[in-house]
Amino acid sequence: MTVYDPDSERYEDIDSSSKDEVVNCYAYSRKTGENLDKVALTDVSRALSNNGQFIWLGLYDPSLETMVKVKDAFDLHELAIEDAFADHQRAKVENYDNDMVFVVIRTAKLEDNVIRYGTTAIFMGKNYLITIRNGPSNSYAPVREHCHRRPEKLRMGPIFVLHAILDFIVDNYMPITDRLGRYLREQERYVFTYEFDKGTLKNLYQLKSQLVHMRAIILPVQDICSFFINHKKSEIVSGFSQAAKPYFRDVNDHLLHSLDAINGLNEMLSVVMNTYMAMVNMGQNEVVRKLAAWAGILAVPTAIAGIYGMNFDFMPELHWKYAYFIIMIIIIALCSFLYYNFKRLKWL
C-alpha cells in the first residue's frame, strides 16, 4: 500500500465545486468487488436497500448540515455522531446492537518537527462504511486506489476497507518516528559540548514531550486491533468475514513496530538528555578546577607579599642586599612547581 511521505507535499482529493464535504461515495459489488459507480448522497437510501452491494462514503471536515443528511441516510446512532466530532477523542471501538461498529482513531502529521493530530471516525455497517476526517490528516486517495486494484479483496465487504484505512493510518506513524529519529541525531551534535545552551535543552524536552504524547495517542489502537482479532460473534456486524482476521493481525504488527520505535526513541532521548547535562556539569567542573589551580598558584606570591607587607621593624632579610632577588626566585620556583603539577593533573 502507498504510504504517505512526510517530506512530500500534502494533497487533498476534495472536489472544490462540490456543495458539501463529500470526498467520495462509491458503490461496490459484493460478488465481484468491482467499483459500480458513484452514488449521490441523496440516493444512498435506495442503494442501501440492495444487499448485493455496499457503499463507501468519505467525508472531510463535514458541516452540521452534511452530517444531518448522512445520519438520516444511514440511520446512525446519535452518540456515535457526537463522539465523531469530540475534540481530543481517545481512539476506541464500539458496537451498536450488532448493526454498526464505530471506530475512532487519531491521525498524525509532522509539520516543522511538530506533530499535528487529527481524528478519523469510521462507521461500519453490514453494507456501508463511512469515514469522517477532521483536523490534520492525509488524503485516503491512496487507500481507495489500493482497494480498487484488489476487487477480490473487496468481496469481503466493508471490513476490508476498514482494514485498509487502519493499515494506512498506522503505516503513516512510522515515517514520523523516522523523521523524529533523524531530528534527534541532528541534536546530538550539540550534546557533546561543555557549553550550556538553553535552546538545545528546550528542543530535547519538546521532542520528549511529543514522543510521550504520540505514544499515548497510538497505544489505544492496540485495543481496536484486538477487538477485530479476538471479537465474539455477538460483538460485530453480521457478515464479518473470518478471512479478514489475519489482515488485522498484520495491522497490529505494524503498530507494535511503531510503538517499539517510539519507546526506543524515548529511551535514547533520556540518555541524550542525561548525557547533555553530564557534559555541561563536566564543563563547569573543568572551569572550577582551572580557577582553583590558578588561585593556588597566585596564593604563593600573595602570601609572601602579605608577610612582607606587615611593616615590622625587625625583619632581618629586609636589609639584605640580595633579599629581593632571593624572594623573587622563591616565588617563581614555587609557582612553577605548582603549575607543573596542576598541568600534570590536567587541571590546567
Image (cartoon, grey):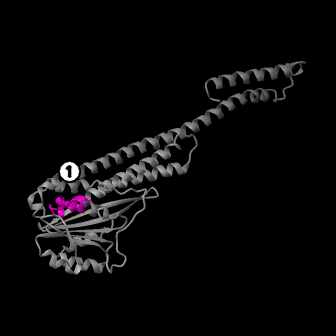
On the question of residue 12 being in view, the answer is yes
Q: Is residue 159 one of those drawn in magenta? A: yes
Residue 289, percent from left and from top: 61, 32
Q: Secondary structure at mark 1?
A: helix
- Residue at numbered disc 1: 249
| 343 relative to 136, above or below | above
Q: Residue at x 84, y 26 (%)?
A: 312
| 283 relative to 119, above or below | above
Q: Quadrant of residue 6?
A: bottom left
**Main structural element of the magenta stretch: helix, strand or loop?**
helix
Q: Residue at x 38, y 53 (%)?
A: 176
Residue 318, percent from left and from top: 87, 22
Q: Nearer the viewer, residue 152 or 124?
A: 152
Residue 324, percent from left and from top: 86, 22
Q: Quadrant of residue 14?
A: bottom left
**Range of magenta residues:** 147-165
| Image quarter of the C terminus | top right
Q: Nearer the viewer, residue 345 or 162?
A: 162
Tag 1: residue type? Arg
